[in-house]
Image: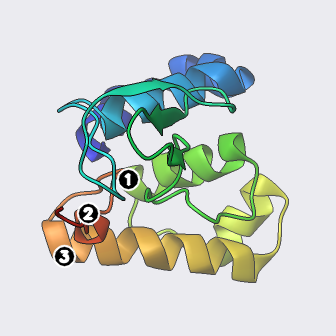
Amino acid sequence: MADFLKQVTPVKLEQLLLDEDRLLEFIASEKWKEGYVCRKCGHNNYCKGKKPYSRRCTRCKHEESATSHTIFHGCHLPLSQAFRLAYEVCLDPEISTYELARQLDTRQMTCWKLKKRMMECIEQRGKLEIVHSSQFAVRSL
C-alpha cells in the first residue's frame, strides 16, 4: 500500500477521499486480491454482505466487512481521514502526531494511536500493508 500511496498525487488523493464508496472498493480489492477465505471456517465461496463491499461466507454465513482485520479496523476516524493519515505517514514517517491532528482537525491521541498501528506494520513487514496477516487465523475443519 505504501508504494501505491507514494504514487498518488495530491489531486488524485482528493478525488479518492471525496467518495467513501471508492475507498471501500479499494480496501476490499487490496484485502481480497488473492481471493476470499472465510476466517471462521476456511471456505472460499461468498456472496454479497449487508454492508457495502462486505462478503458473507456461503457455508457458515459469517460476514466480514472490507475494513475488518485491516489497519482501518476499529478506527475512530472517518475512513477518508484515516486514509489521509496513512497517506501522510507513507510520505513522511517522521511527521508528528500534533501536525497530523492539526491537518485532520482531530485529537492528537487519535492520530497517535493510528500512526502507532501503521508504524508497527511498517516495522514488522518493512512496508505498510492494509491487511494484518497476523490475524489470518482460520480454523480448519
Tell whether 61 sits left or right of 131: right
Query: In the figure, residue 41 lies in which quadrant?
Result: bottom left
Horizontal and vertical percent for residue 46?
39, 28
Q: Is residue 7 above or below residue 83?
A: above
Q: Amino acid at mark 2?
A: Phe
| Picture colour scheme | rainbow
Horizontal and vertical percent for residue 32?
30, 34
* Residue 127 vs residue 42, the one in the foreground: 42
| Pointer 3 residue | 124
In terms of sequence position, does the residue under pointer 2 or pointer 1 come before the other? 1
Q: Amino acid at mark 1?
A: Cys
Q: Residue at x 63, y 16 (%)?
A: 15
Q: Which label lies toward us, 2 or 3?
A: 2
| Pointer 1 residue | 90
| Pointer 2 residue | 136
| Element assignment for label 2 | loop
Q: Mark 3 and mark 1 in contact? Answer it, CB < 8 Å.
A: no
